[in-house]
Amino acid sequence: MRRRKYNLGNAIYFTMNGAILAFLLAPIAIITVFALNSAPYISFPPTGFTLGWFSKFFSSPEFMNAFALSLQVAAAVLILSMLIGGLCALALARGNLPGNRVLTAFFMSPLMLPAILTGLALFQIYLLMGIGRPIWGLIMGHTLVAVPYVLRTTLAVLHNFDRKIEEAAAIHGAPPARVFFEITLPLIRPGVLAGGIFAFIVSFDQFPISLFLVAPGGETLPVVLFNYMKFDLDGAIAAASMVSILMAIAVVVLLEKVIGLKAYVKL
Amino acid sequence: MAKRLEDRQPRGPRVSPIAWAIGPALLLFVLFFVLPFGAMALLSFLSGNPVANPNVSFTTRHYERFFADSLYFEALISTLRIGVITTFFSLLIGYPLAHWMARIHSRTGHALLLMAVIAPMLTGVVVRTFAWMTLLQDQGVINVALMDWGITDQPLKLMYNELGTIVALVHIYVPFLVLTLTGVIGRIDERLEQAARSLGANQLRAFIEVTLPLSLPGILAGSLLVFALSISAYVTPFLLGGTDVLTLPMLIYQQVAASFNLGFAGALGVVLLAVSLVVVITYNKVLGHFAGGEKMA
């Protein structure tokens, strides 16, 4: 391998990539400093150590209600998107549907169309129909943008495994239901699960749709944080952010274990 | 008819019963995606809210207002400008990282790099925008460091302007570009570059003449993705742009929350949607073209 040899090109290449990694990670890491800094407002350099911001976050009913709501919504989205997305992936990969490509693009489109418009559009139709802003309306909005993630990981798994395994089982006399439960389901489970975990964190972090669909007093955590940040920039936000970052890290580790992060390279 | 359908289906002759599994997703998408967007488009052509006021009529005045007042048109232009600049810089810093990730041989190294890219991506936009506020504000990390080192006397204006907005948007959306590009670069045979080198090209020339052109579909798809995401950003331009930045998503929310003008919000939404649809359709064409007949997952 010539690449291993030290030369100027390699030095530039790795310095540049080191700087890019720092740009990606440093802003996230710096939040730790502010979550533990005792200064009353976000300021640098830190003046002392405190865990007070965490206790403020965990003892504030405003933050805690929002946190609980976000977790509940995310859990509902996890289940719904796994069911709907998993079934949809099966239909797209095994259903021999005409117009498969267009259908797939359609089901993936909430990822690329502005989420703020999805929020606006749902807000408008709920208003027109006199539904108001119920929690299930919020959950459906989140599920809509979460289904594509489940679809993608499940389709990836379905395309990767050999269809002949299912055919072999069928040829040996297994009825379709048995083929499904004993071959297909166990094989796609990691894809569906990984998609569901992804859907969970996407819902937990979801902002633009929630902005339009939350009822006053029933805001999700990102909306509460946003409203707080408009007026105040203190360590409580940093502490809340730390909780959110730790969840993201936990999810990344979990995804690596369930399916391997490589599945996301096609994103 | 059935015969012709068969001809178009090289992989399987008949629609299988499994196709019914698409039902729940179809229902969800019709009720909570197609219908709402239809309602949004409809409202943008109505003179008022049909529920509150039975005497509404069709009108194009919301669109006339958009094109008549330069404020709104400038918001569209600045949304697109921020999108283009964000995409350009995301590409600039995303490409080297994607190249490294695609070419690294150590499995642990690859997994760690993936984590470094995906973990920030899974951190919410509100949290990441907050992180940039702590870095860019007057008492923020960057200004304090610059003043300590005697580089400047007073804090530089790093946020409440387009600069701060774009820096944070690049940080937020670059992971999407890196992941798209890594996949494409990873599929380019490394031996092609080695062959170019053994024929006398240096590393840089081998990269520019072999790898770079072959990764063009990834560049295009990734850029379109980042562009589509950054023109719909709300939190970041709102918090980091201050009064200097006004984008279409900010206007849209303002029309709903402050003015409660659903028709005009709908018209602004339709304009943003039109831009996004062009981007999304191009994106799918790019993926479809380069993937050949293969389905993109």
Image: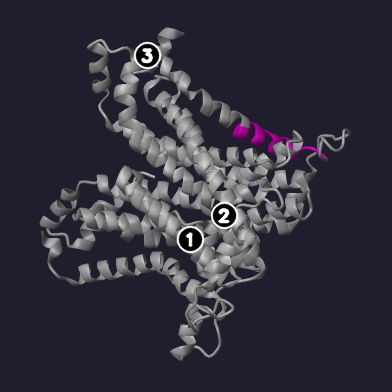
Residue linked to disc 1: A243
Q: CA distance from mark 1 to mark 3?
A: 54 Å
Placement of B5 over or under B170, stated as above or below: above
Residue type at mark 3? Asp
Reading the image, the residue beneath label 2 is A67
| Left or right: A259 as drawn, with respect to B176 | left
What residue sits 69% from the left and 38% below the top? B40
Decide whether the magenta segment is chiefly helix, strand or loop: helix
Tell me which residue sits at (45%, 35%) in the image.
A82
Q: Chain of mark 2?
A: A
In the rendered view, would you say B105 is above or below B160?
above
- Label 3: how many Cα within 10 Å (few below 14, some 14–19, many 20+): few
Whether callout 1 and callout 3 share a subunit is answered: no
Q: Secondary structure at mark 3?
A: helix
Residue at image point 30% right, 50% down: B213
Residue range in magenta is: B32-47
Q: Which of pointers 2 and 1 lies earlier in the amino acid sequence?
A: 2
Q: CA distance from mark 2 to mark 1?
A: 10 Å
